[in-house]
Image: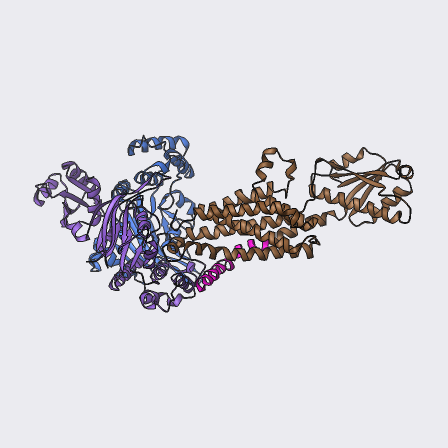
Chain colours: A purple, B brown, C blue
């Protein structure tokens, strides 16, 4: 598979605040992947985006995009990337059409010329063509921002937290759009603090505290998870949670809705029957006991607690 | 080129679609000129004064009649008691007092000259100055009229002006040059800086920087509309001051416009510099207001005479560009000065512009700061 | 658990010709964690504003913490707590100063505030940070303090508006531990969120669309009833905009 982006030993330290935003990270992004940067606020996602999009230079390390270095070849890189920053809110006082037209002229192209690229998305915006961007709903704004970033037919599209603050329906539609863009051959780098969106990416990097905890496909990350997770429903969840946590250091129990989830390290030699009987001994009635698949969030927590 | 036009059109749309911005850009200059202008001329009308007439003779009577006939003054009392003056002033009943000495005619007859004292309330500097000038004009008028044909060598009645409360008052105050520099600052520094910083705030600056557009291009397209607007404002102010306020331009109009353009370019450079250094509209506004507007109001000589300030402030006032612009405009508009007189100030502003241009050029980056 | 703290019947709000909330009828029980979901424009915000006494309903009936939304909005406000992701604490005040300020807003006496603050500091083990400015605290602590402030005056109901957006999973889990704990002491938790994985943490959820509740119940039951695998699918099924 062809490699689109190569990041080598990149560190970023902000001089003024002495904050280390990125700490020696290296990874590659394959062409035509949906690559997800997953991590909470402050993990370094936006800084990484700004480095990849040639907006800032790392204090150390190098970034190559299709062989072009962000340091000296930024002019070439800027020709074929599209970027939607997190706080990008379009020109509120310009209409949908005026916004799009402006960004087309930024790239010395026209809406007509590249209409094929944005057609699928723009079709939803067409009825509101003459509405001011400030009067659009969140989902529509996001579509317009996407169109603006796509108007130059970019090879790589960078989307910084596109789903933050967006309602669930628009989020689902957004991911459908992303998949379509991938079919058109575009490489997409997307960041999100929401773990449940990780599984929609081809490959993900889990980021925390300026570092990358792991990079892989979501499936691989989940299948490498070292614990089993059980969902237990009982007549006394708070007591259940307490006794499970007290039972063994390698037991982690936490509430999950109307049930308790129990994570047990796979290396621990204990089977379901033993757990159930242990719970029954404490006079807790079990309504449901089942093995469930771990989520990316479970994996993330595991990486964090393991150091 | 097409792209640049597109950019500029977009910028004008931003301006036109925000009524508040329009108001600041076009309403403010007009309102400022009119307020400053009419506040002055209006109040001079029917100003109450008293006359202390120690002479009580033909000449003094004629002179009082002359003053009374004038629409600007209303004499509320003619007295021989000098002590009432201060009380009247304290109570705010009068704006000026005229003291005619007892020996007015004898002085005139013997030495050919005499003195009249005019006392004004100089807490309101501009007002006191205007009154002083009006009364002086009336007296001069009277002289030329009544003494026409008589063979007398020169001015015989010399008004002695005494400024109460602010005796060192100096300089002919004029608001139009002041308003001009304030408006230029507002449009070229504050509004320009805000317009650029706004792009940073809404995130579009990042998008534009990651595009092939050269950053300097973005800046130029931002600056052009504000340059255009400031020239419109300049025209507006000059038209208003000539046709509405009857304040003729004594010097060369061409020179005045050239100097204003120089100042506009200086301000635009400052605006760009502020926008490069800041990342929020609020801070940009604060910097423009505190960094430029306040010094203009306080240190340019427009509101308060620089000569009266402590030495340190006098020194600081030298780095305020509008001080020099104020001097230039005043000299050209009021004194009819030519380039040979204002070349030094021009040179100072030009070097300031060059300095700001260099600094903003050097801090400007193709990436985010 | 049986006591009802929020009850609405045919609650309706019209703005001119537009009906933002239409015949809303539901109940929330004491100590329950209730997720209030819906897409933007579904009527969520309007519904909540009516519940917390900020907006007078056009018709219908609603009581919150036993008080009528028409007649006793002031009493409602005294009996609820509120925490949002965007603003909940003053960053340039210390933990104790925040507690004092918000306690004061709800009319607690300064003696009571002192005692309660001390208890809270003890309970959360935050002796070391009680006198620190909020902005100096790590995000996990900030959230804990924010929640503590929201329940400081012992409200019957706490409204949480997207409480854990953007925080790391460990902090989030700790935060939800606090929520469960509060619910065990019979404080009702009313959560609005765009994030469906957060919805899974709730005892019951409602999904609003076009001004009405389209689904109401326990998350896993709802999934079963609508025959979908995930909350995402459920939501999509219910609230997808018909273009």
Specify start and end residues of the magenta stretch as a single range.
B1-28
Give the residue furthest to the front.
B340
Q: Let me know if residue B23 is in the magenta part.
A: yes
**Residue at 58% across, 36% down:** B315
**Residue at 58% across, 53% down:** B261
Q: Position of residue C17 (x, y in %)?
A: 43, 63
Q: Position of residue B340 (x, y in %)?
A: 65, 48
Q: Position of residue B146 (x, y in %)?
A: 88, 47
Whether residue A111 is visible, yes or no, is yes
Above-or-below relation of A25 to C122: below
B88 displayed left or right of B192? right
Q: Depth check: C119 or A270 in front? A: A270
Q: Let me know if residue C70 is in the magenta part.
A: no
A136 displayed left or right of B269? left
Overall secondary structure of the magenta section: helix
Q: Position of residue B285 (x, y in %)?
A: 50, 47
Question: In which image quadrant can residue A210 be found?
Answer: top left
Question: In which image quadrant can residue C18 be found?
Answer: bottom left
B269 displayed left or right of A286? right
Q: Depth check: A222 or B288 in front? A: B288
Q: Which quadrant would the N terminus of chain B be assigned to in this image?
A: bottom left
Whether residue B281 is visible, yes or no, is no
Above-or-below relation of B214 to A26: below
Q: Depth check: A171 or A19 in front? A: A19
**Residue at 64% across, 42% down:** B303
């Amino acid at each position: 598979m062809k490699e689109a982006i190569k990041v080598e030993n990149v560190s970023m330290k902000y001089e003024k605040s002495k904050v280390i935003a990125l700490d020696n990270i290296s990874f590659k992004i394959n062409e035509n992947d949906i690559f997800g940067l997953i991590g909470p606020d402050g993990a370094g996602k936006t800084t990484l985006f700004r480095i990849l999009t040639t907006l800032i230079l790392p204090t150390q390390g190098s970034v190559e995009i299709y062989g072009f270095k962000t340091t000296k070849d930024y002019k070439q890189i800027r020709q074929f990337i599209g970027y939607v920053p997190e706080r990008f809110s379009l020109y509120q006082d310009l209409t949908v059409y005026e916004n799009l037209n402006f960004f087309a002229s930024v790239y010395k192209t026209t809406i007509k010329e590249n209409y094929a690229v944005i057609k699928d998305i723009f079709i939803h915006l067409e009825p509101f063509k003459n509405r001011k961007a400030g009067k659009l709903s969140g989902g529509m704004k996001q579509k317009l921002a996407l169109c603006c970033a796509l108007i130059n037919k970019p090879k790589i599209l960078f989307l910084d937290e596109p789903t933050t603050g967006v309602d669930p329906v628009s989020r689902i539609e957004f991911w459908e759009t992303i998949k379509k863009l991938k079919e058109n051959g575009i490489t997409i780098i997307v960041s999100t603090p929401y773990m449940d969106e990780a599984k929609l990416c081809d490959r993900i990097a889990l980021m925390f505290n300026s570092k990358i905890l792991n990079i892989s496909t979501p499936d691989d990350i989940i299948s490498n998870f070292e614990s089993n997770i059980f969902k237990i429903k009982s007549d006394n969840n708070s007591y259940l949670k307490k006794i499970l946590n007290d039972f063994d250091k390698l037991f982690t129990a936490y509430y999950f809705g109307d049930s308790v989830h129990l994570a047990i390290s796979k290396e621990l030699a204990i089977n379901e029957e033993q757990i159930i009987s242990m719970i029954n001994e404490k006079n807790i009635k079990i309504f449901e006991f089942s093995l469930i698949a771990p989520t990316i969030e479970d994996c993330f927590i595991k990486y964090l607690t393991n150091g | 080129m097409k792209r640049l036009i597109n950019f500029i059109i977009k910028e004008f749309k931003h301006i036109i679609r925000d009524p508040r911005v329009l108001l600041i850009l076009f309403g403010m200059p007009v309102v400022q000129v009119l307020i400053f202008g009419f506040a002055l001329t209006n109040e001079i009308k029917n100003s109450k004064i008293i006359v202390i007439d120690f002479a009580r003779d033909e000449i003094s009577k004629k002179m009082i009649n002359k003053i009374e006939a004038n629409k600007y003054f209303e004499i509320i009392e003619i007295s021989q008691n000098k002590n009432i003056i201060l009380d009247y002033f304290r109570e705010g009943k009068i704006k000026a007092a005229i003291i005619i000495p007892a020996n007015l005619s004898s002085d005139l007859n013997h030495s050919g000259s005499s003195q009249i004292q005019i006392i004004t309330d100089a807490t309101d500097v501009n007002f006191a100055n205007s009154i002083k000038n009006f009364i002086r004009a009336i007296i001069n008028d009277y002289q030329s009229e009544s003494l026409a044909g008589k063979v007398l060598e020169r001015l015989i009645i010399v008004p002695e002006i005494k400024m109460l409360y602010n005796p060192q008052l100096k300089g002919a105050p004029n608001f139009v040059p002041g308003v001009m520099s304030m408006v230029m600052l507002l449009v070229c520094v504050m509004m320009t800086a805000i317009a650029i910083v706004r792009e940073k705030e809404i995130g579009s600056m990042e998008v534009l920087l990651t595009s092939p557009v050269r950053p300097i291009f973005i800046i130029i397209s931002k600056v052009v509309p504000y340059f255009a607007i400031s020239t419109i404002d300049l025209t507006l102010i000059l038209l208003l001051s000539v046709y509405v306020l009857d304040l003729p331009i004594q010097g060369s109009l061409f020179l005045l416009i050239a100097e204003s353009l120089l100042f506009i370019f200086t301000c635009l450079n400052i605006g760009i510099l502020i926008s490069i250094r800041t990342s929020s509209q609020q801070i940009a506004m604060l910097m423009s207001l505190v960094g430029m507007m306040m010094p203009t109001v306080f240190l340019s000589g427009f509101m308060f005479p620089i000569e009266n300030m402590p030495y340190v402030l006098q020194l600081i006032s030298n780095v305020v560009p509008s001080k020099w612009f104020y001097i230039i405009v005043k000299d050209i508009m009021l004194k009819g000065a030519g380039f040979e007189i204002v070349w030094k100030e021009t040179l100072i502003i030009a070097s300031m512009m060059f300095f700001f241009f260099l600094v903003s050029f050097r801090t400007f980056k193709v990436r985010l700061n | 658990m049986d006591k009802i703290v929020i009850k609405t019947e045919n609650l309706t709000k019209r703005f001119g010709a537009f009906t933002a909330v239409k015949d809303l009828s539901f109940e929330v029980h004491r100590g329950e964690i209730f997720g209030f979901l819906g897409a933007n424009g579904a009527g969520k915000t309007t519904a909540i504003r009516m519940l917390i006494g900020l907006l007078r309903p056009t018709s219908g009936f609603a009581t919150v913490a036993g008080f009528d939304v028409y007649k006793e909005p002031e009493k409602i406000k005294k009996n609820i707590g509120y925490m949002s992701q965007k603003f909940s604490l003053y960053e340039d005040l210390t933990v104790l100063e925040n507690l004092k300020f918000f306690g004061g807003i709800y009319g607690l006496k300064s003696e009571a505030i002192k005692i309660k603050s001390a208890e809270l500091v003890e309970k959360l083990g935050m002796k070391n940070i009680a006198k620190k400015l909020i902005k100096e605290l790590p995000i996990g602590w900030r959230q804990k303090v924010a929640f503590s402030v929201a329940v400081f005056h012992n409200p019957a109901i706490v409204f949480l508006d997207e409480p854990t957006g953007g925080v790391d999973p460990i902090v989030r889990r700790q935060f939800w531990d606090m929520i469960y704990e509060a619910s065990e002491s019979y404080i009702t938790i009313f959560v609005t969120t765009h994030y469906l994985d957060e919805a899974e943490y709730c005892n019951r959820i409602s999904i609003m669309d076009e001004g009405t509740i389209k689904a109401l119940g326990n998350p896993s039951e709802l999934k079963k009833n609508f025959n979908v695998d995930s909350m995402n699918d459920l939501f999509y099924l219910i609230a997808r905009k018909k273009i």
